[in-house]
Image: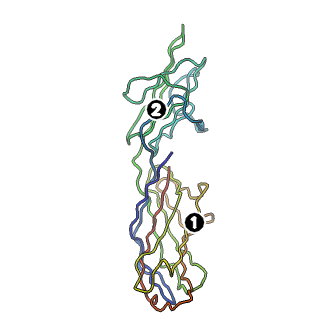
Amino acid sequence: MRRPLDMKTPAAKAAAGMALVLMLAAAASYAAVGRGGSHERRGTGAPLTVRSSPIAASGTAAIRIVGHPPELSTDSTARFRVVATGEPPLRCRLDGEAPQACGAAIVYRGMNPGPHTFYVGAQRPGAASLKASFEWDVLEPKPFTISPRPAAVGPLYPGAVPSPIPVVVTNPNSVAITVTSLRVSADGGPPGCDPDANLTLTTPALAGGKLRIGAHASVSLPSATVAAPTIALLELPVDQDACQEASFELTFSGSAGA
């Protein structure tokens, strides 16, 4: 449903050697909040999860919008579910478009940022027409930041236990986001000290929505539930003198969805 977008920028410098120490304050790296794809309408789409939150929609007991997006959303896909007494034929309209026949489950994709209104109506024989509507805003998602704290990492030695790299993840959006991945990679290094061969970098598994960040909030890692990225200097059966005082560029990136 959501297609995460990733962007990478240099985030930190590492000096490596027989005793590796992370240096330099880190610039922020970025990852975009995912958004949907092409515009599509369906009358009877895949099963929808009906939200348990209060329904912020107009209507009557005879016609109700029981499933809808949040009032503020970064998702360009909007799903609706309508319940109408007697199950009369429904006609739906998005914003200023012409009404079209629709089913009880309606999906709109490729929504542009800005305010939107969904309308649904029905006409029962011999009865007044039924109408309901829902208004919401699609927000242009802003990239969240990953700010590492390399100064908190002590010396690293060949073959030692990986050391955590504390990071602060900040959500600038007006809605909560769920970070779905964090990544770190190393580039650079002098001849004879390839980072791919001499360093090992790990990032936390974030399945199950572990890293949920509220609107305009930050989360520091490691936390009680999510580990921080780690870095280690491998002990190799070759001469590693070339790695003494070597510098590597660490790049942090990630992806998220609303």
Name the amino acid type tagged 2.
Arg
Q: Measure the alpha-carbon separation of dots 1 and 2.
A: 37 Å
Residue on which disc 2 sits: 41
Helix, strand or loop for disc 1: loop
Residue 121: x, y in percent?
A: 49, 21
201 versus 122 height, above or below = below
* Dot 2 crowding, Cα within 10 Å, few <14, some 14–19, many 20+: few
Residue 189: x, y in percent?
A: 41, 82
Residue 202: x, y in percent?
A: 55, 71
Q: Residue at x 58, y 78 (%)?
A: 162
Q: Residue at x 50, y 41 (%)?
A: 70
Reading the chain from its start, which is encountered first: label 1 or label 2?
A: 2
Task: Give the colour scheme of this rendering.
Answer: rainbow
Name the amino acid type tagged 1.
Pro
Residue on which disc 1 sits: 204
Residue 240: x, y in percent?
A: 50, 90
